Image: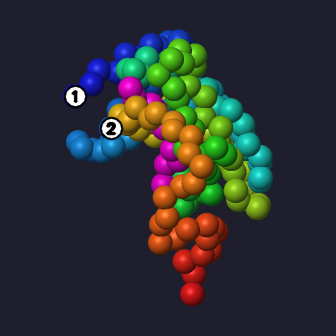
Amino acid sequence: MIELAIRKLRPEAVVPTRAYHGDAGLDLSACERVELGPGERSLVPTGLAVAIPEGHAGFVQPRSGLAAKHGISIVNTPGLVDAGYRGELLVNLVNTDHEATFVVEPGMRIAQLVILELPVVELVEVDELPASERGVRGFGSSLH
């Protein structure tokens, strides 16, 4: 278990919780009212800052219910929160619905924060990469 230090930057900010025991994501809530017209995007403040432990990263991901029911997602999903970042968590929401405006209300759960341990990666420059079954075949290469 790791500890995640969290700071409320505004009194109305909601400390994240898990909907169910064992859930991977901590629900992030909006701290301001935001209207998203069809196709619009906006940085939605949470009023929170976190101190992710070294060797870990935070990944801000969409909530499946908002996506399925309203077409609400995150532009840069998953959003990456590095261990050294201490600013406010902002969620870059986008309304993919072609007709309906979506209103984000303060306190509404808008995203999930998942904390993952990261391996230490050392880059090694080589003249050639080892062979693999896939090789250089790219997008759509596994479609028949």
* Residue appearing at x 24%, y 44% in the figure: 22
Q: Identity of the amino acid at label 1?
A: Met
Residue 51's place in the image compared with 132, above or below, is above
Looking at the image, is mark 2 or mark 1 earlier in the sequence? Answer: 1
* Dot 2 and dot 1 residues touching (CB under 8 Å): no
Question: Secondary structure of the magenta portion, mostly?
Answer: strand
Pick the front one: 60 or 8: 60
Q: Which residues are magenta?
A: 55-65
Q: Quadrant of residue 79?
A: top right
Q: In this rendering, which labeled residue sits more in front, label 2 or label 1?
A: 1
Which image quadrant: the C terminus? bottom right
Q: Residue furthest bottom?
A: 144
Residue 60 visible somewhere in the drawing: no
| SS for dot 2 | loop
Say how many tags the image has: 2
**Residue bearing mark 1:** 1
- Residue at 76 percent of width and 61 percent of height: 98
The image shows residue 19, relative to residue 90, as above or below, that is below
Q: Is residue 124 above or below residue 48?
A: below
Q: Residue 113's x, y, as percent?
A: 44, 36
Residue underneath mark 2: 18
Task: Please tell me in which quadrant of the rendered image residue 42 appears.
Answer: top right
Amino acid type at image mark 2 = Arg
